[in-house]
Image (cartoon, rainbow, N blue to C red):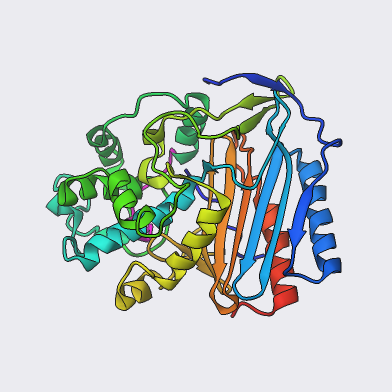
């Protein structure tokens, strides 16, 4: 579930006709920004929504001690014309990696795992296994090639209920590309497979699924009541996810999804309020030892982006968090430590090209925060 970082400021449940959003008024609340700023922000988001043909948008900005701004508009369900609300859970895609990385670092703090452990301890026959470390996987610096990421994502888009190949089969497929491996810890290349391997290591080290570990070490301690690592294909609540079909000129319903297809790289479901809580806990290291947090937040360049990447977290310009795309949903979750500000963007659209539908709104909201409340660094 590849991310769309913007720190620079087959099987479906139904076919839906193209939207007619004009008659649905946006709802915004604000006690954070000056009234004219909030009004312009609301208009800007609504304009982007119309221009990009987005079924719905939900935004929440919270600055502790100062107030919050929220925006919601569009339809949660295009067929029933049910309005989107702020409390509906959605698939958070690659934002899941922040949950998975935190859970794994909890294991490190408990002494059950070392970040400099080579993966040869668990997968000795994999290329470069003696040199690739747990830390390399967390930081996307394993050197494992990802030439088929786009193809794999397209296959998942077309077949969201497909069975998932075993990790052993995935490892074998990647091992066949041995000549394309790069030297570990020389460059950051974003690929979900790093987190597939991490999930396999967790299973052997902790004796439990990565989803169980995330629930026990992150979701429950932070009391995230609307966040889950799903085991079923449905999404709780009334929100649906959509993808535009250029051939039919209609939206396809892409809500149903087999969670293991995303796994530790993108399976988690959450909502705006829980992500506000989690974003701050993540970037303050509420669940980790201070030294573990310090190391997690040491970012290095990620190829193809203007973003630095730490251990499961995107960093840059004073922002900390992650973006993500998955069938039917685009999400941005970021925290600005200097301002004690969280901003969450959720759009219930993601097309087959896997291009984020929320990044333009995120850029506008981020710019508004910085221009109004001060610099992030």
Residue 326 to residue 338: above or below = above
- Asked whether the viewer can see residue 180, the reply is no
| Residue 310 image offset from top left, x and y in percent | 41, 66
Vertical side of 108 occupied by 153: above or below: above
In-image side of 316 versus 58 (left or right): left
Instruction: Give percent across and percent down for residue 65.
Output: 62, 76
User: What's the residue at 54%, 75% (across, down)?
Assistant: 337
Question: Picture coordinates of residue 20 (x, y %)?
Answer: 82, 30
Residue situated in front as seen by the camera: 327 or 281:
281
- Residue 142 within the segment the image draws in magenta: yes
Q: Residue at x 50, y 54 (%)?
A: 274
Query: What's the residue at 40%, 34% (across, down)?
Result: 259
User: Is 232 left or right of 206, judged from the image as shown?
Assistant: right
Quarter residue 70 falls in: bottom right
| Residue 26 painted magenta | no
> Where does residue 135 sit, x and y in percent of width and height?
29, 63
Name which quarter of the figure residue 37 lies in.
bottom right
**Which stretch is magenta?**
137-148
User: Closest to the observer: 362 or 36?
Assistant: 36
| Relative height, residue 32 to residue 153 (above, below) | below
Front position in the image: 113 or 23? 23
Quarter of image, res 355? top right
Q: Is residue 295 visible?
A: yes
Relative to 275, 267 lies left or right: left
Would residue 348 appear left or right of 298 to someone viewing this image? right
Please name the predominant secondary structure of the magenta segment in the image. loop
């Amino acid at each position: 579930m590849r991310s769309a970082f913007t720190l620079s400021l087959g099987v479906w449940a139904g076919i839906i006709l193209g939207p007619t959003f004009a008659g649905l008024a946006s709802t915004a609340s604000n006690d954070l920004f000056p009234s004219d700023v909030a009004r312009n922000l609301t208009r800007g988001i609504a304009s982007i929504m119309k221009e990009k043909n987005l079924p719905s948008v939900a935004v929440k900005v919270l600055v502790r001690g100062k107030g919050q701004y929220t925006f919601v508009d569009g339809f949660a369900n295009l067929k029933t014309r049910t309005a989107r609300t702020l409390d509906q859970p959605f698939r958070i895609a690659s934002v899941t990696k922040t949950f998975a990385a935190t859970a794994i670092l909890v294991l490190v703090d408990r002494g059950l795992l070392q970040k400099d452990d080579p993966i040869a301890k668990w997968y000795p026959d994999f290329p470069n296994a003696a040199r690739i470390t747990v830390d390399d996987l967390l930081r996307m610096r394993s050197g494992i090639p990802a030439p088929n990421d786009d193809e794999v994502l397209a296959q998942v888009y077309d077949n969201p209920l497909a069975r998932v190949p075993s990790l052993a089969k995935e490892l074998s497929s990647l091992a066949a590309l041995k000549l394309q491996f790069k030297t570990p810890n020389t460059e950051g290349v974003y690929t979900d497979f790093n987190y597939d391997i991490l999930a396999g290591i967790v299973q052997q080290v902790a004796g439990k699924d990565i989803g169980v570990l995330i629930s026990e070490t992150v979701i429950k301690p932070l009391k995230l009541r609307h966040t889950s690592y799903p085991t079923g294909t449905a999404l709780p609540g009334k929100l649906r996810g959509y993808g535009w079909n250029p051939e039919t000129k209609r939206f396809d319903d892409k809500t149903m999804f087999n969670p293991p297809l995303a796994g530790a790289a993108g399976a988690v479901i959450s909502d705006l309020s829980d992500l506000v809580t989690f974003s701050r806990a993540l970037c303050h290291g509420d669940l980790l030892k201070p030294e573990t947090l310090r190391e997690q937040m040491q970012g290095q360049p990620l190829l193809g982006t203007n973003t630095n990447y730490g251990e499961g977290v995107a960093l840059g310009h004073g922002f900390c968090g992650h973006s993500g795309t998955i069938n039917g949903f685009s999400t941005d979750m970021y925290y600005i430590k200097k301002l004690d500000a969280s901003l969450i963007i959720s759009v219930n659209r993601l097309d087959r090209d896997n291009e984020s539908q929320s990044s333009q709104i995120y850029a506008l909201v981020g710019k508004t925060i910085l221009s109004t409340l001060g610099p992030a660094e």
